[in-house]
Image (tube, helix red, strand yellow):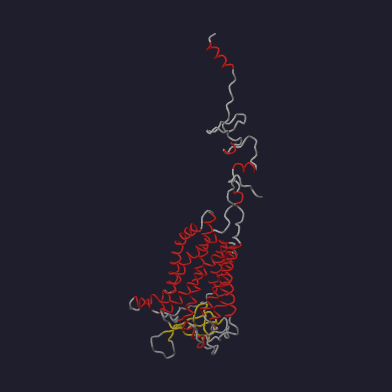
């Protein structure tokens, strides 16, 4: 047998070698040497991401494979509060202003019975009959009035019918049988129609239904947060009705009253709605700075434009009060209170945006957070300013229409007392809104970067603490 045939027979008699499974390392096979001649470590399979057969994925193995697996178990807990130093700084900045607002409310709160009402008493009734007739007996002119018979439902003449005349003019409402109406009683003969003036409709029921629908919508969407928002709304109205209005009617400085009332509303409403946190404190701080700017600008430009605050409604108020009142201060008070609601929206939104950016990328520094938050704020402030302008323009629409019909030039119309004060109100409020974005974003970024970020990855040499 030849040598080649002998070799072929020997190869056929040998068993086939077991091919290694590439997914399972063979501990019996020596690891190839590295290019520099040194041997690979015995646990190189772990460094390659594979586990030896039967080895449990223990904490020790995870630490050997690398600390980056450690932090994932800590991302689902509650956010760690800011450092004590930041909390103390926020408290030091806000506490004096909160104390000043409360002290101002206490000092300005009216004591005593308040001014005596010089207006007419409002009473209610239901229209039972209407008839067109001359405005007075023996009147031969073409002037016509609507004689209305009203069954009184309250007041000194409750249950009685009175007849009163209403001029038929474009400026007077049209009353019909079955309408629930409001009359003004001047204190004369309770059964004489001359003692009453038919002034308006009763709107209590539809307004109550609308308020209930609003509350239901807020609760359905907001749930617990919506309930807190409704509570904050009730609190705001309570401050306005129980403090701001009585204090101004008692003769206190309207601007000081508005500042104290707005301060209490700002602190109470924001913390009630959003909770006691560094995020809410940042929004309060931004609102306070912007509101101060609005107050200063409105005072400066109302004086520069010689705004008196006197219009038809203010003149009627002065006649009813029987004493003087700072009408320019009343105008400034309206600007401050009117801007507060819009400022809350902007500052809370900006603060929340910065905190979410920080949570999404804890590696962002102050500059990156500020730049990203400012980009969000630019879009928000453009829509907010437009909303503010349209709101004021809609409220002043009758005045704008009257001015357009007057036939005078546009400059004269814009410079009139009624229009000029709306321009000052709108532009000053818009400047405050614009300023609120960079101010609030900067403060929020400074505070947010001091929030403890997610736990950093541990290096293989870093021991794991319990």
Out of 437 and 342, give the one closest to the viewer: 437
Q: Quadrant of residue 109?
A: bottom right
Q: Give percent across and percent down for residue 37.
A: 55, 32
Q: Give percent across and percent down for residue 39.
A: 58, 33
Q: Is residue 16 left or right of residue 167?
A: right
Q: Give percent across and percent down for residue 404.
A: 36, 76
Q: Give percent across and percent down for residue 82.
A: 59, 60
Out of 453 and 299, give the one closest to the viewer: 453
Out of 26 and 224, give the one closest to the viewer: 26
Outermost residue toward the top in this view: 1
Outermost residue toward the bottom in this view: 138
Out of 404 and 109, give the one closest to the viewer: 109
Say above or below: 29 vs 332. Answer: above
Q: Quadrant of residue 25?
A: top right
At 60% from the left and 78% from the top, the residue drawn is 106
Pick the quarter of the image with the N terminus. Answer: top right
In this rendering, the count of numbered labels is 0
Outermost residue toward the right in this view: 466
Q: Is residue 218 left or right of residue 131?
A: right
At 41% from the left and 90% from the top, the residue drawn is 139
Q: Quadrant of residue 214?
A: bottom right
Say above or below: 129 vs 431. Answer: below
């Amino acid at each position: 047998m030849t040598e080649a045939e002998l070799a072929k027979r020997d190869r056929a008699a040998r068993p086939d070698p077991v091919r290694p499974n590439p997914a399972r390392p063979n501990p019996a096979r020596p690891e190839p040497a590295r290019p520099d001649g040194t041997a690979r470590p015995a646990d190189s399979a772990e460094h390659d991401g594979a586990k030896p057969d039967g080895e449990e994925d223990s904490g020790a193995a995870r630490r050997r494979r690398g600390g980056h697996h450690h932090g994932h178990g800590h991302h689902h807990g509650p956010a760690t509060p800011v450092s004590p130093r930041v909390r103390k700084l926020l408290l030091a900045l806000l506490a004096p202003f909160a104390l000043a607002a409360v002290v101002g409310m206490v000092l300005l709160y009216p004591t005593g019975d308040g001014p005596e009402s010089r207006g007419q008493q409002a009473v209610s009734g239901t229209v039972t009959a209407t008839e067109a007739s001359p405005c007075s007996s023996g009147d031969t002119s073409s002037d016509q009035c609507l004689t209305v018979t009203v069954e009184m439902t309250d007041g000194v003449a409750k249950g009685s019918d009175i007849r009163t005349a209403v001029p038929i003019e474009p400026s007077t409402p049209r009353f019909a049988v079955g309408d629930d109406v409001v009359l003004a009683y001047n204190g004369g003969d309770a059964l004489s129609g001359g003692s009453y003036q038919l002034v308006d409709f009763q709107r209590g029921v539809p307004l109550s239904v609308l308020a209930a629908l609003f509350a239901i919508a807020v609760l359905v969407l907001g749930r617990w947060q919506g309930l807190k928002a409704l509570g904050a709304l009730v609190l705001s109205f309570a401050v306005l009705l129980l403090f701001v209005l009585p204090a101004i009617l008692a003769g206190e400085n309207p601007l000081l009253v508005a500042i104290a009332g707005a301060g209490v509303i700002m602190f109470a409403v924001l913390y009630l709605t959003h909770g006691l946190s560094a995020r809410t404190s940042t929004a309060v701080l931004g609102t306070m700075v912007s509101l101060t700017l609005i107050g200063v600008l409105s005072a400066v430009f109302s004086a520069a434009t010689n705004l008196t605050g006197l219009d038809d409604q203010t003149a009627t108020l002065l006649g009813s009060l029987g004493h003087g009142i700072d009408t320019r201060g009343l105008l400034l008070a309206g600007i401050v209170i009117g801007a507060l609601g819009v400022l809350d929206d902007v500052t809370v939104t900006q603060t929340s945006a910065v905190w979410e950016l920080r949570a999404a990328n804890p590696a962002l520094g102050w500059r990156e957070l500020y730049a990203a938050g400012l980009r969000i704020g630019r879009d928000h402030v453009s829509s907010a300013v437009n909303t503010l302008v349209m709101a004021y323009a809609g409220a002043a629409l009758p005045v704008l229409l009257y001015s357009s019909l007057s036939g005078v030039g546009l400059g004269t119309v814009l410079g009139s007392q009624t229009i000029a004060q709306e321009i000052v109100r709108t532009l000053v409020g818009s400047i405050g809104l614009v300023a609120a974005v960079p101010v609030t974003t900067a403060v929020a970024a400074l505070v947010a970067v001091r929030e403890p970020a997610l736990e950093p990855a541990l290096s293989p040499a870093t021991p794991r603490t319990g």
